[in-house]
Amino acid sequence: MSGRAAPNGDCTVVVGCQWGDEGKGKVVDVFAEDADVVARYQGGANAGHTVHVGDHEFVLHQVPSGILHPGKRCLLGNGVVVDLAQFFSECDHLAERGVDVRGRIGVSTRAHVVFAHHRALDAALETRAKHKIGTTGRGIGPAYEDKTGRRGVRIGDLLDRALAEETVARSLQGARERLEWLGADPASAGTLEEALAPASRLPDVAADVGLEIWEARAKGRRVLLEGAQGTALDVDHGTYPYVTSSNTTAGAASAGAGIGPTAIDSVIGVVKAYTTRVGNGPLPTGFDERMDAFMRKLGAEFGATTGRPRRCGWFDAVLAAYAARVNGLTGIAVTKLDVLDTLPELKIATAYRLGDAAEHPFPPTVQELDQAEPVYETLPGWTKPTTEARRLADLPANARAYLDRIEELAGVPIAMVSVGTRRNQVIRGVAA
Ligand code: IMP
């Protein structure tokens, strides 16, 4: 591992490089210390970003993880789908816990809204599906369907009472008809009054996010763009159809925040030191049942949004190299290294065997992924605690060798290593 300085571009994207739950919340929280503006650019309340400050744990679904640093401006870009009831309850909950959110949060007037009827459709579609995706049930797919179908409701629509009533009533009626067609109860869509209720609070937060970011950059401020989910859940580049309904990769940061791609200076990819997945779909390096249960307990691998158990597996360097390519990574943040502290030996998948090909890049179809045989390299464990390490030199030699191998196989320098849940349990300034 090289010893260059921490990322210091004016605009940095933080993106998940596995199936979500890589620990992006903690990485964003750490980088946010040096940022002025933190913005989310895709996804919605399906995300669950966990941040520990002192003895307090915060799980954020809609509000960017930068909110826990006083004074930082936090934005939701046009690419996010916003569940307003959830969003305002999260803001109120943060305020109750002493986090001052007043004047610090902006929501793009171009962002689309997730309503109760989207959640009802999400549930109905999953119930009826032959091949279930295992969604978070937060209405994400149906909300993005409405967006691309050009029948969605945007934050800006809700600022005008007459327009709000018209657009939401149309959206609600469409959902009721679809629910009926799906054999679900149309009443589960909720009422127009319920759907419109949170709109009264919007004037305090509605913003032109792209313009704000542009102006912040022009004033020399530092911007952090916070991705949700992960590369393998991207609707184009992930394990389709077992994916979320947005582009999660770094390219989406530009479109979803409303800034040109040339405004982005660096892209930090977050990888957990092993692999997890929640929801259905292939996990090539997945453990056998016994090891799976052991690692789930060791790493507390339960979904932050749904509480579902996550499936666990060895570190997949085929996926890491793919993520480095499709995201254009300039650095990697490795999280949860400490979870591996007690394992006597570790494996890394260095290639996939598929048919006659011994080395295969991350395949585009789930059919191929189901057949892909990971080729493993075994490395010795370090069987010593890493939780107190604050410099690379503090880590046991075998832990450094493990990180070096990840860096080598991904082809991207490691910028940060996390060795525990607390904010200070981090090794920074590793590479640019
Ligand atoms: P949806 O985003 O709720 O539609 O769910 C689609 C797939 O993405 C499911 O496999 C979910 O488990 C997964 N997913 C969505 N959000 C997250 C996340 O924040 N972390 C991990 N998996 C997620």
Image (cartoon, rainbow, N blue to C red):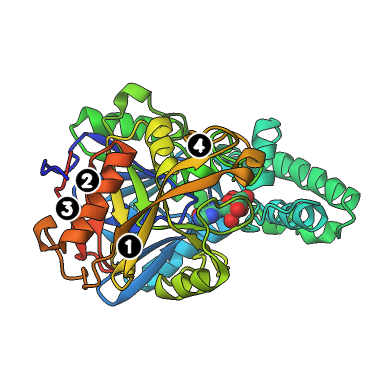
Question: What residue would you read off at disc 2?
Answer: 415
Picture coordinates of residue 140, whole percent (x, y): 62, 48
Q: Is residue 424 left or right of residue 25?
A: left
Instruction: Indicate the quadrant containing the N terminus: top left, top right, bottom left or bottom right.
Output: top left
Q: Is residue 213 above or below residue 302?
A: above
Q: Amino acid at mark 3?
A: Arg
Query: Callout 3: helix, strand or loop?
Result: loop
Q: Is mark 3 within 8 Å of ligand 1?
A: no
Residue 370: image tag: none
Q: Is the residue under label 3 in contact with that under label 2 (CB below 8 Å)?
A: yes
Q: Is the residue under label 1 in contact with that under label 2 (CB below 8 Å)?
A: no
Query: Callout 4: helix, strand or loop?
Result: loop
Residue 428: image tag: 3
Q: Is residue 325 above or below residue 67?
A: above
Instruction: Between residue 147 and residue 7, name the one nearer to us.
Output: 7
Q: Give the Cα separation between the discs numbered 4 and 2.
A: 24 Å
Picture coordinates of residue 163, whole percent (x, y): 67, 38
Residue 362: image tag: 4
Residue name at image x 79 percent, y 61 percent: 188
Disc 3 crowd rating (10 Å Cα; few below 14, some 14-19, many 20+) is: many
Instruction: Between residue 351 and residue 64, name the one nearer to us.
Output: 351
Tell me which numbered mark, 4 or 3, is placed earlier along the sequence: 4
Residue name at image x 83 percent, y 54 percent: 128
Question: What residue would you read off at disc 1?
Answer: 336
Disc 2 crowd rating (10 Å Cα; few below 14, some 14-19, many 20+) is: many
